[in-house]
Amino acid sequence: MKPTRIWSDTQWMRGLIIGMLAASTMLVGACRDNAAHDLVLNAAGTAATVITVDSPAAIAQESAADYNNNVNGLITAKTLKSWIDDWPANRPAGITGRLVILQINNGPTGQEYITPHPATGVVTYSVVDASRLIETRSDGVAQIKAMVPDGPTMDRFFHDYGIDPTKDMLVWVMGTGGYLPNMWMGRGWYMMRYWGVPKTHLALLDGGAFYGMPSYMGGTASCDENVSTSCLPDNGTFSVRNLPEDNTALQATLEDMMHIVRPTDVNDLHDGVFIWDARNIGQYSAGLIDESGGVPANYMTEFQNGGSQQGHPNGALDLNFTNMLDSATGYSYKPKSELQAYLDGRVDANGKGFTDGTLQPVGPGRAYQSGDTVYTYCETTFRAMITGIVSGVILDKPTRFYDGAMYEWHTMSNIVAKNGLPLLPIDSPWRTDLTNRSYFRPADSAAAVTTRVITDPYAISADAIVRADQEYKRGVGGGSSSGGGALPPPPNPCANAG
């Protein structure tokens, strides 16, 4: 067994302060509607900013039944066109700055971009650099790819595009609709809300722009990053430290997931959590069945990223993210009533609905329960951006993203990798290859298992990313997450969640 750590008094004091902050954030974030507050001191030692630590319930928002009536969250082409037509007259109440259109892919040749109108404050930027939206980071246990960016990366984003998110309206759009572009839009929304961009200043365009507003598209952008970044404003002065909302509760950590999983693979209707696997049923079932209901010839075809195992955390329900979108309408979201029906446990006309570990539909009333906090994930929490938009932006359900996702969950095992060594030692407390944490099937050979960067298999905590971001937000850290532990994991935020 790993020997007990011995810390200096200074280390203990620093760990205690940050640990209490993180623990209070998680307690508030998981189950309650109220918010905590922190005072951030300026150089003179007086309170400069009051930071509100929001719960998932406070972060969530509800769409109108008719998406045309939304002025933030999920908006339609009708709304965006009205803003472009006369931004000074039609912009939403409380918006005093520009309409900043952040386009993550192109339309067809000659109609690649929503045409900017800089004279009236409408600008369009292509955002093609993935490093702006995701980052490889360590949560203290392991290095995980495709995580929410750190504070300096967000500040660089605001600087490069000259954005002030307390004045500007920020709209993420797809030039051409698709599954992957929707995921990238979701990642953009997630990183901004996580860092505290107000929901009233942030929107996603429902469906591809070329489908919904082709006459508003042309071959010119305010800056086309496909060609060069030298055209970016490069003059922003805003920092995430200027945003008073701490929305880090949007991210569920590995230890959060270990707190909420059940000892057996059943959906507990009374535990206050709803675990949503956004992947296909083949991955959820580790190759027992596929989306058509058949049996895959080789269960290993369902493995991704050289994972050591495939399956799901105990208690999770599966509903493929593709069911949330309508490919016939530019990959827009289905009507609100249809999305709610899924969470009510109903199946659609194609027989698709939430499935539990028995690989059967759960049935009406046996999916989401009132007051549940949604925990959603996929392999790298890209597909889960779509399911999380459904629950947290359209349906007003408290929602958290397990950002480490199955990439991390399936790293946490004693299974041997292709280097001949197990990913984790047998006595690591973070193992998920245990039946009281997961349903899983191991890879059929060590040669198929990719090695991982393990920061500390005996780490006391797995929330180094959230803690680093909370520190940066409050001006007491450099923003990068580090390995190693600080304090024991906080108590279970939902007393009956196990």
Image (cartoon, grey):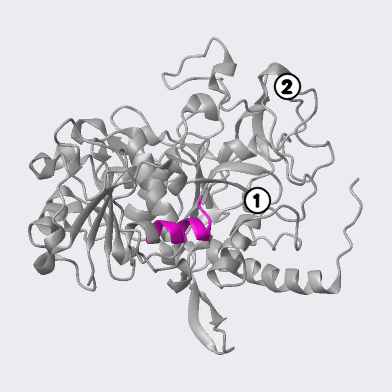
Q: Which residues are magenta?
A: 148-158
How far apart marks 1 and 2 lie (CA) works out to 24 Å
What amino acid type should be assigned to the residue bearing mark 2?
Lys
Residue at screen point 51% across, 14% down: 295
Pinpoint residue 100: horizontal percent, then vertical percent: 25, 57
What amino acid type should be assigned to the residue bearing mark 1?
Asp
Q: Residues within 10 Å of mark 1 (few under 14, many from 20)?
A: many
Residue at screen point 75% across, 28% down: 415
Q: Residue furthest front?
A: 230
Q: How many marks?
A: 2
Q: Which mark is residue 365?
A: none
Does 164 sit above or below residue 318?
below
SS assignment at label 1 = loop
Q: Camera-side residue: 200 or 473?
A: 473
Label 1, on which residue?
Answer: 139
Label 2, on which residue?
Answer: 418
Q: Quadrant of residue 382?
A: top left
Q: Is residue 451 magenta?
A: no
Left or right, 422 with reference to 490: right
Left or right, 265 with reference to 109: right
SS assignment at label 2 = loop
Pinpoint residue 387: horizontal percent, then vertical percent: 40, 43
